[in-house]
Amino acid sequence: MDKRIILFRGKRVDNGEWVYGNLVKHNNGCLDFERYDIFTGHSGWGFEPSLSFERYEIMEHTVGQFIGREDMNRNKIFKDDLLSTKKRDVLFQVVLDNESCGFKFKSIETGTLFEIDSSVEKLEVIGNIHEKGK
């Protein structure tokens, strides 16, 4: 039985760098306070208590979940990544499809949604929608 890897990424509020780890959404119960943090490392919950972790506040709009697949170069693929064929003739964005409650490829040219299957191994992550100039 394969273990599913649950991993998130987001851009840090303080310096704009990407950080990868566990996502936590904080809310004080009112609409005036909400923030997203990513914890890296291990918190000790279910692991050795001596292991430590770091917490980073991240920009909500940059949150992306690992979709459980890798590209042709074995790079992890996340929501909002941009993928292309080797010839760069087709461009896709990884999106969350609310109807199927799953991730799909969206053609940048036509907007058509495609299932993510073994063809992902023929695609390459070339960036994401949150990077300038990509």
Image (cartoon, helix red, strand yellow):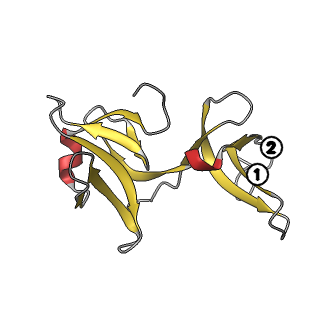
Q: In the picture provided, is 31 more to the left or to the right than 130?
A: right
Which residue is located at x 23 percent, y 46 percent?
A: 120
Q: Is disc 1 placed on a helix, strand or loop?
A: loop
* Camera-side residue of 63 and 44: 63
**Residue wearing tag 1:** 44
Residue 119, position in %: x, y?
17, 49
Tell me the CA gap for discs 2 and 1: 7 Å
- Foreground pick, 20 / 2: 20
Q: Hey, what amino acid is under mark 1?
A: Gly
Amino acid type of the residue tagged 2 in the rendering: Ser
Picture quadrant where residue 29 is located = bottom right
Quadrant in which the C terminus appears = top left
Which mark, residue 50? 2
- In the picture, residue 53 is in which quadrant? top right
The answer to whether any part of residue 36 appears in the image is: yes
Residue drawn 34% across the image and 40% down it: 82
The number of numbered badges drawn on the structure is 2
> x and y percent of residue 3 in the render?
44, 59
Is residue 54 found left or right of 113 in the rendered image? right
Q: Is residue 108 above or below residue 32?
A: above
- In the rendered structure, are the residues bearing label 2 and label 1 in contact, judged by CB atoms less than 8 Å apart? yes
Looking at the rendered structure, which numbered label has been put on residue 134? none
